[in-house]
Image: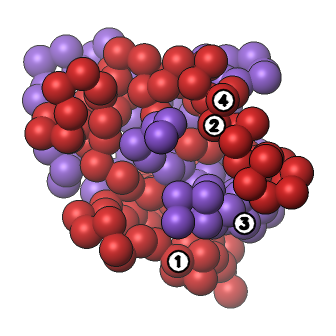
Amino acid sequence: MAVASDGLEDLQRMVDRVREETDGRPIEYTLVSDPGAAVIGRYGLLNEDAAPDRLIPHPTTYVIDRSGVVRWKMTEVNYRIRPENEDIRAAIDELRGR
Amino acid sequence: MRTRSLLTLAVASVFATACSPDEQSRTSQLGPLDAAALSPADLDRVAVGDTAPDFRLAALGADPVRLSDLRQSQDVVLVFYRGHW
């Protein structure tokens, strides 16, 4: 599930663009809208220096287990260093006891 | 590059749909409404081992989603990203 402060119209525009740029590959996860950044702020992720007119989070990925506990987390402090699929997959595999 | 990032999310979410060990589900009421006095910028607030604050948000093309409902049946990869560009 992916959270941004975008309204649903902006989310739809992004989905359309991704579809165009990837030859129709759909986004297979849920996009949710946090227009007032209440959730972003609750997680402590609001980037107050990012832009005066937009509510932008520090990009962060969590792996959450079924009891709601955070089992893995990465906040991007450098846009060049992003979580890799393998990192996230490894965290999930560990969760499943593999 | 950002498109690649989105694909990363797609792959990650596929991996997230399988089962996890059974654990008693805890109720989390740490939602935004309970946290009005908290600073919106505190990157360490939700750390590994903490319960992820629950929330319910409007979803694109679907009914509103509540984190605590979603994680009942699957592990969840929760990604905060900057939004449209």
For label 2, the SS is: helix
The answer as to whether the residues below labels 1 and 2 share one chain is: yes
Chain A hue? red
Q: Chain of mark 4?
A: A
Classify mark 1: residues with Cα within 10 Å, few (<14), some (14-19) or many (20+): few
For label 1, the SS is: loop
Left or right for B46, reference A10:
left
Classify mark 2: residues with Cα within 10 Å, few (<14), some (14-19) or many (20+): some
Residue A52: name its quadrant. top left
Amino acid, disc 3: Val
Q: Which residue is mark 3?
A: B11
For label 3, the SS is: helix
Q: Chain of mark 1?
A: A
Amino acid, disc 1: Glu
Q: Which residue is mark 4?
A: A13
Residue projecting furthest to the right: A24
Amino acid, disc 4: Arg
Q: Which residue is mark 2?
A: A14
The answer as to whether the residues below labels 1 and 4 share one chain is: yes
Alpha-carbon span between mark 1 and mark 3: 10 Å
The residue at 72%/66% (across/down) is: B11
Alpha-carbon span between mark 3 and mark 2: 18 Å
The residue at 35%/76% (across/down) is: A81
Looking at the rendered image, the disc whose residue lies closer to the viewer, 1 or 2, is: 2
Q: Position of residue B62 (x, y in %)?
A: 78, 22
Chain B hue? purple
Alpha-carbon span between mark 3 and mark 4: 21 Å
